[in-house]
Image (spheres, coloured by chain):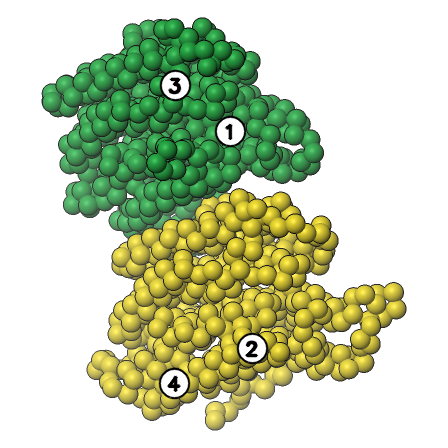
C-alpha cells in the first residue's frame, strides 16, 4: 500500500510534466488529462482514507521509505529518507485534498488563457500538498511545503483578477507578491527551527518518528516552539499575520482560491500539529495560552471583518481567517477532544470554503462583479447555485447535520474542558457573528425581489454544479455520520505526546 | 629543496592539453577563412567555439585518470581526489562557456581564436588554484586565471562599458594581488614555509596564540582572496565588471573565478590555517553575513539583468563563506556541493540570458517582457534556474542550501544560518520580478526566433543537472565527500605525525 502514497505525490507531479509535453494547440486534451489525473487522485485518496485501519494505536500505516541522502556530511544512515506514511490526522486531510483537486479541475474547465501552464502549476501545487500530509521526514515535509508555495505567485498573477474599490485598486500582482512574501517569511522561521531541532537532537537523521523519540531540553522547547508556531501559523492565517490571506484569495482565480483556502491553509495548522506539537510537547504546553489567544482573536477579528465586507469574495476570505482561528483554538486546547476538533475543522472548513469559492466564482463569471449590494433576488435566476451557497453558509455557521457543526462542537467542548472559558465564550460569539454575515449576505443578494438588472443571469455551469454536489456530499457525510472521521482522528490524537503528558 | 622530488610531468597532462589546445586555436583561427568552410559557410567562426569546448572536455576526461590516486608534483601541486574533482568541474565549466560563447563571439566580437584560448588558459589557472599545495604556486595560478579574465572582460574593445569594466577589474585585481602577496610574505615570515602542510604543522605546534605578523598575514590573505571571490567589502569591482564584460565572459567570471577562488580558499584554510580556526572564524563569519545581506539587498534595486546577477552572485558568496567559517569535514563537502549546484544553476541562467541577448540585443530586466509568448522553453528554463538560485525545492538550490546552512548550524553558527535563510527568501523577491516580466509582460512584436540547437543543448544539460542535483543528490554528495575528505586526511596525518 505504500506505493499508493508515492503515487499520490507522483501522479500530480508526472501529470504536470505530461501537460508540458502536450502541444498548446490541444487545450481540450489538457483538460481531459487533468480530469483523468484528478479523478485518479480522488480515488486513491478515498482508498487511503477508507482502508486506513484506526484500531490498534497510533501506528503509521502504509509505510514507504526510499533512502534519499545518507552517510554523507552530518547525515547518518537514513539521514534523509522519502518516508511516507498515513496516520489518523493525515488520512482525512489526504481525502480533503483529493476532493478539492477534483472539484477545482472541473471548475477550472473554462480557463482558456494558457490552460496548459495553469494545470502544470496547479498540479505542482497539489503534489506539494499531498507530500506535506504524507511526509514522515522533516526535510521532505519542508521540501513539499515549499513546492506547494512555489507556484502560487504565477497562478495568482497570471490568471487572477484585480479588485477595483473605486478609490483604489488592489492589483492581482500585489495580492500575489504579498502572499508569497508572507509565506516565505514564515518559511524562514520554520527553516531556522528545523536547523535548531536537528542540531539539538544530534541523531543524524531527519526522520520524524526518530526525532519524536528524542527528549528535548525544556528551555530549548520553549525557545524553538514559537518559531514553528508563527512560521506555520502564517500559512494557517494566524492573526496578526493573516492579511495576505484575503488579498491573496480574492486575487486568485476560482480553482486556485479553492485549493488555497481549502487545502493550503491547512498545511499551516497541520505543520504546527505534526512538527511543533509532536516534537516539542513541553514548548507547546508553555505557549498554548498564546496560541489560544491568537486563535480567538483570529476567529473574532475574521468574523467582524467579514461582517464589514460587501465584496462576496473578501467576505469568504475573512471567513476563512475566522475559521482557521477555530482550528488554532482547537490545537491550543492540547486535549484530545479539542485537537480532534481542530483536525475535523480543517476538513470541514476545507470542503466548505471550496464550495463557497465555487459559488462566488460562478456568479462572478457571469456578473463580473462581486458586490453583494448590487445583487438582489438572484435565487430566482440561479436556484441551484443559491441552494449550494446556502448549504455552504449554514455549514460555516455550524448548523447541526453539516460538517461545520461537528467540528465546532468538538473545539468548543475542548476549549471549555481545558479551562479557557473566556475563549470558548468569545469563540461562540464569533460563530454568532458568522451567522449574521452569512444570513445577511443571503438575504441581500439572493432572496427578496429580483433586481431586473440581473434578468440575464443563468444557472451555474454543469461542471460547477458537479463540483458543488461533490463537495456537499462530503459536508453531509461528515455532518450526519462523523464517526469514520472521529474514529480515525481521535485514535491518533489520543496518542500524541502532548496529549498523553 | 628536499631530495626525491617527484618530477612526473605526466601528472600535468590535463593542463598541457589545455595550453596546447589554446595555442592550436590561435593558429587555427589564422587559417580559418572568414567566410567559413564550404557549405558550413554561414557558421563563420562559430565552430572554433565547439572545438575549444572539445579541448576542455578532453582535459576533464584525462584528469579522471587520477581518480583515487594521491601523489604530488615536486611538492608544488597535489594530484588527489580534490584536484580531480575540480579539474573535471572546471573543464566542464570551460566547455559550457565555450559553447555558450560560440554564436555571441561570431556575431559581436573580433579575434575568436584568442578569445577561446583565453578561456582555456583561465581553466588552467583555475586547475592550478585547486591543485596548489604551496602559496606561491597558488598565487601564480590565481594570476593566470585573473589575467585571462581581465583580457576577456575588455574584449569588446569598441564598447566603452567593456573597457571601463576591464580596467576597473584589472586595477582592483592588481591591488588585491598585492595584498595577497604581502600576506603570503608575512605568513612565510611567521612560519618559515610557503607549503600548506608545513604552515599547518608550524601553527599547530605553536600554542602561544596568534602574533602580529601572523595576524596581519591572515588578514591580508583574507582580504586578497575576498577580492577574488567578491566578498563584501571587497566586492566593488563585481557589478561593473559583470555589466561591462561580454555576456558569456560574465557567465565565465561568475562560474570559474568564484569556484576556483573557493577551491583555493577551502584548501588553504583547511590544511594550513585550520589550527588557528578560533582566531579567524568570526572574521569570516562577519564577512559572510555582510556579504549576503548587502548582495541580496542591493540586488533588489537593479534594473539590468547582468548587474542583478552580479549582486545575486555576491549574495551567494556570502552563503559559501559560511562553509569556510564553519570549517569542518562536513561543512567543506556541503560547501563544495553548494558551489557546484550554484555554478550549474547560474550557468543555466546565463545561457538563457545569452540566448535572449543573441536574439534581441537587450539586457535590461524590462526587456524580458513576454518571453513566455515568444520563447516558452526559454521562459520555463530561466524560471527554473531563478527558482533554484532562490533555493526553491525540486531544483538544486533547495537541497544544497539546506545542507550547507545546516552544516553551519552544526558548528554553532545558527545565527548565521538564520541570516542566510532570511536573505535567501529576500532573493526570491527579485527573482520573482524577472519571472513576472517574462510571464506577465506584454511581448514586443518581432520575428519568430530560430532555435539554436548547440545553445539549447547546453541549456538542456544544465537544467537536467539542476533537476538531478535537486531530486537525487546522493551521487554528487558521495563524489564530493571523497574529494574533500583528502583535505582533512592530510591534516589528520600531520597532527598525528607531530
Disc 4, disc 1: CB below 8 Å? no
In percent of the image, x 65 and y 30: which residue is there?
Answer: A27
- Tell me if residue B291 comes above or below residue A430 in the rendering: below
> A223 left or right of A392?
left
The chain coloured yellow in the image = B
The residue indicated by pointer 1 is: A8
Mark 2–mark 3 Cα distance, whole angstroms, equals 62 Å
Q: Position of residue B159 (x, y in %)?
A: 59, 76
Kindly report which numbered mark, 4 or 2, lies closer to the viewer in this rendering. 2
Q: Is residue B172 visible?
A: yes
- Check the residue under mark 2 and report the chain it is in: B
The circle drawn on residue B160 is 2
Mark 3–mark 1 Cα distance, whole angstroms, equals 43 Å
Q: Of residues B90 and B443, which is closer to you in this image?
A: B443
Q: Which callout, 3 or 1, points at the residue further toward the start of the chain?
A: 1
Kindly report which numbered mark, 4 or 1, lies closer to the viewer in this rendering. 4
The residue indicated by pointer 3 is: A374
The residue indicated by pointer 4 is: B179
Mark 4–mark 2 Cα distance, whole angstroms, equals 29 Å
Q: Are marks 4 and 2 on the same chain?
A: yes
Amino acid at each position: 500500500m505504500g506505493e499508493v502514497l508515492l503515487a499520490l505525490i507522483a501522479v500530480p507531479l508526472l501529470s504536470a510534466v505530461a501537460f508540458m509535453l502536450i502541444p498548446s494547440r490541444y487545450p481540450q486534451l489538457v483538460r481531459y488529462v487533468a480530469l483523468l489525473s484528478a479523478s485518479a487522485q480522488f480515488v486513491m485518496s478515498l482508498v487511503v482514507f477508507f482502508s486506513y485501519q484506526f484500531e490498534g494505536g497510533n501506528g503509521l500505516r502504509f509505510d514507504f521509505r526510499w533512502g534519499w541522502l545518507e552517510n554523507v556530511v552530518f547525515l547518518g544512515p537514513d539521514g534523509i529518507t522519502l518516508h511516507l506514511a498515513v496516520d489518523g490526522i493525515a488520512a482525512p486531510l489526504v481525502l480533503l485534498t483529493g476532493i478539492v483537486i477534483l472539484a477545482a479541475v472541473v471548475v477550472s474547465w473554462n480557463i482558456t488563457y494558457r490552460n496548459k501552464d495553469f494545470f502544470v502549476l496547479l498540479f505542482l501545487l497539489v503534489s506539494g500538498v499531498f507530500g506535506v500530509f504524507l511526509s514522515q521526514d522533516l526535510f521532505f515535509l519542508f521540501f513539499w511545503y515549499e513546492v506547494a508555495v512555489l507556484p502560487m505567485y504565477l497562478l495568482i498573477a497570471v490568471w487572477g483578477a484585480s479588485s477595483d474599490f473605486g478609490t483604489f485598486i488592489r492589483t492581482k500582482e500585489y495580492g500575489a507578491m504579498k502572499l508569497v512574501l508572507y509565506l516565505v517569511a514564515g518559511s524562514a522561521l520554520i527553516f531556522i527551527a528545523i536547523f535548531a531541532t536537528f542540531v539539538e537532537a544530534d541523531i543524524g537523521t531527519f526522520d520524524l518518528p526518530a526525532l519524536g523519540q528524542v527528549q528535548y531540553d525544556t528551555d530549548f522547547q520553549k525557545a524553538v516552539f514559537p518559531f514553528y508556531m508563527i512560521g506555520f501559523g502564517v500559512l494557517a492565517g494566524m492573526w496578526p499575520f493573516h492579511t495576505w490571506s484575503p488579498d491573496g484569495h480574492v486575487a486568485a482565480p476560482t480553482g486556485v482560491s479553492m485549493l488555497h483556502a481549502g487545502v493550503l491553509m491547512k498545511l499551516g495548522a497541520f505543520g504546527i500539529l505534526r512538527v511543533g506539537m509532536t516534537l516539542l510537547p513541553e514548548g507547546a504546553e508553555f505557549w498554548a495560552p498564546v496560541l489560544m489567544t491568537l486563535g480567538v482573536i483570529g476567529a473574532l477579528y475574521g468574523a467582524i471583518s467579514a461582517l464589514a465586507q460587501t465584496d462576496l469574495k473578501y467576505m469568504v476570505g475573512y471567513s476563512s481567517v475566522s475559521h482557521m482561528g477555530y482550528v488554532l483554538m482547537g490545537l491550543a486546547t492540547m486535549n484530545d477532544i479539542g485537537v480532534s476538533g481542530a483536525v475535523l475543522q480543517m476538513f470541514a472548513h476545507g470542503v466548505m470554503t471550496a464550495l463557497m469559492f465555487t459559488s462566488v466564482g460562478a456568479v462572478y463569471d457571469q456578473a463580473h462583479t462581486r458586490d453583494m449590494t448590487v445583487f438582489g433576488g438572484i435565487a430566482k435566476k440561479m436556484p441551484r447555485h443559491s441552494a449550494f451557497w446556502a448549504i455552504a453558509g449554514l455549514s460555516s455557521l455550524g448548523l447541526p447535520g453539516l460538517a461545520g457543526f461537528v467540528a465546532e462542537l468538538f473545539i468548543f467542548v475542548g476549549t471549555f474542558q481545558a479551562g479557557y472559558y473566556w475563549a470558548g465564550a468569545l469563540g461562540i460569539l464569533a460563530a454568532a457573528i458568522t451567522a449574521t454575515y452569512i444570513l445577511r449576505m443571503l438575504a441581500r443578494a439572493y432572496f427578496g425581489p429580483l433586481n431586473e438588472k440581473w434578468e440575464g443571469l443563468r444557472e451555474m455551469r454543469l461542471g460547477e454544479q458537479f463540483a458543488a454536489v461533490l463537495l456537499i456530499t462530503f459536508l453531509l457525510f461528515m455532518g450526519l455520520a462523523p464517526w469514520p472521521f472521529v474514529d480515525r482522528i481521535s485514535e491518533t490524537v489520543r496518542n500524541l505526546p502532548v496529549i498523553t503528558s | 629543496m628536499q631530495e626525491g622530488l617527484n618530477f612526473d610531468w605526466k601528472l600535468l597532462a590535463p593542463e598541457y592539453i589545455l595550453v596546447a589546445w589554446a595555442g592550436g586555436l590561435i593558429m587555427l583561427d589564422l587559417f580559418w577563412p572568414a567566410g567559413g568552410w564550404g557549405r558550413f559557410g554561414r557558421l563563420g567562426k562559430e565552430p572554433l567555439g565547439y572545438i575549444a569546448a572539445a579541448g576542455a572536455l578532453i582535459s576533464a576526461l584525462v584528469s579522471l585518470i587520477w581518480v583515487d590516486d594521491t601523489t604530488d608534483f615536486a611538492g608544488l601541486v597535489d594530484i588527489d581526489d580534490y584536484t580531480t574533482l575540480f579539474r573535471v568541474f572546471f573543464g566542464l565549466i570551460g566547455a559550457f562557456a565555450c559553447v555558450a560563447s560560440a554564436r555571441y563571439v561570431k556575431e559581436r566580437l573580433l579575434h575568436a581564436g584568442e578569445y577561446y584560448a583565453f578561456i582555456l588558459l583561465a581553466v588552467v589557472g583555475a586547475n592550478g588554484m585547486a591543485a596548489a599545495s604551496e602559496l606561491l604556486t597558488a598565487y601564480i595560478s590565481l594570476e593566470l586565471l585573473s589575467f585571462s579574465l581581465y583580457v576577456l572582460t575588455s574584449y569588446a574593445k569598441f564598447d566603452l562599458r567593456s573597457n571601463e569594466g576591464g580596467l576597473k577589474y584589472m586595477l582592483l585585481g592588481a591591488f588585491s594581488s598585492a595584498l595577497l602577496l604581502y600576506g603570503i610574505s608575512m605568513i612565510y615570515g611567521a612560519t618559515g614555509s610557503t607549503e600548506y602542510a608545513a604552515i599547518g604543522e608550524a601553527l599547530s605546534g605553536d600554542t602561544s596564540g596568534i602574533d602580529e605578523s601572523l595576524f596581519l598575514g591572515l588578514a591580508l590573505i583574507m582580504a586578497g582572496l575576498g577580492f577574488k571571490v567578491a566578498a563584501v567589502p571587497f566586492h566593488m569591482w563585481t557589478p561593473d565588471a559583470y555589466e561591462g564584460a561580454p555576456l558569456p565572459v560574465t557567465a565565465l567570471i561568475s562560474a570559474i573565478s568564484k569556484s576556483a577562488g573557493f577551491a583555493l580558499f577551502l584548501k588553504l584554510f583547511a590544511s594550513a590555517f585550520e589550527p588557528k580556526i578560533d582566531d579567524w572564524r568570526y572574521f569570516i563569519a562577519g564577512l559572510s553575513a555582510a556579504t549576503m545581506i548587502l548582495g541580496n539587498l542591493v540586488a533588489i534595486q537593479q534594473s539590468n539583468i547582468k548587474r542583478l546577477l552580479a549582486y545575486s552572485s555576491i549574495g551567494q558568496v556570502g552563503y559559501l563563506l559560511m562553509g569556510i567559517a564553519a570549517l569542518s569535514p562536513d561543512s567543506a563537502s556541503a560547501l563544495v556541493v553548494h558551489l557546484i549546484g550554484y555554478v550549474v544553476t547560474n550557468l543555466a541562467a546565463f545561457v538563457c540570458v545569452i540566448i535572449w541577448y543573441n536574439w534581441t540585443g537587450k539586457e535590461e530586466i524590462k526587456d524580458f517582457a513576454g518571453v513566455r509568448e515568444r520563447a516558452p522553453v526559454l521562459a520555463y528554463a530561466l524560471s527554473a534556474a531563478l527558482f533554484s538560485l532562490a533555493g526553491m525545492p525540486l531544483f538544486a538550490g533547495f537541497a544544497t542550501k539546506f545542507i550547507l546552512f545546516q552544516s553551519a548550524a552544526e558548528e554553532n553558527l545558527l545565527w548565521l544560518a538564520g541570516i542566510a535563510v532570511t536573505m535567501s527568501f529576500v532573493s526570491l523577491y527579485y527573482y520573482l520580478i524577472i519571472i513576472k516580466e517574462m510571464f506577465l509582460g506584454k511581448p514586443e512584436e518581432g520575428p519568430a526566433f530560430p532555435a539554436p540547437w548547440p545553445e539549447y543543448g547546453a541549456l538542456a544539460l544544465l537544467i537536467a543537472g539542476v533537476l538531478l542535483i535537486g531530486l537525487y543528490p546522493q551521487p554528487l554528495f558521495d563524489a564530493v565527500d571523497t574529494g574533500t575528505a583528502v583535505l582533512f586526511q592530510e591534516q589528520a596525518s600531520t597532527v598525528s605525525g607531530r
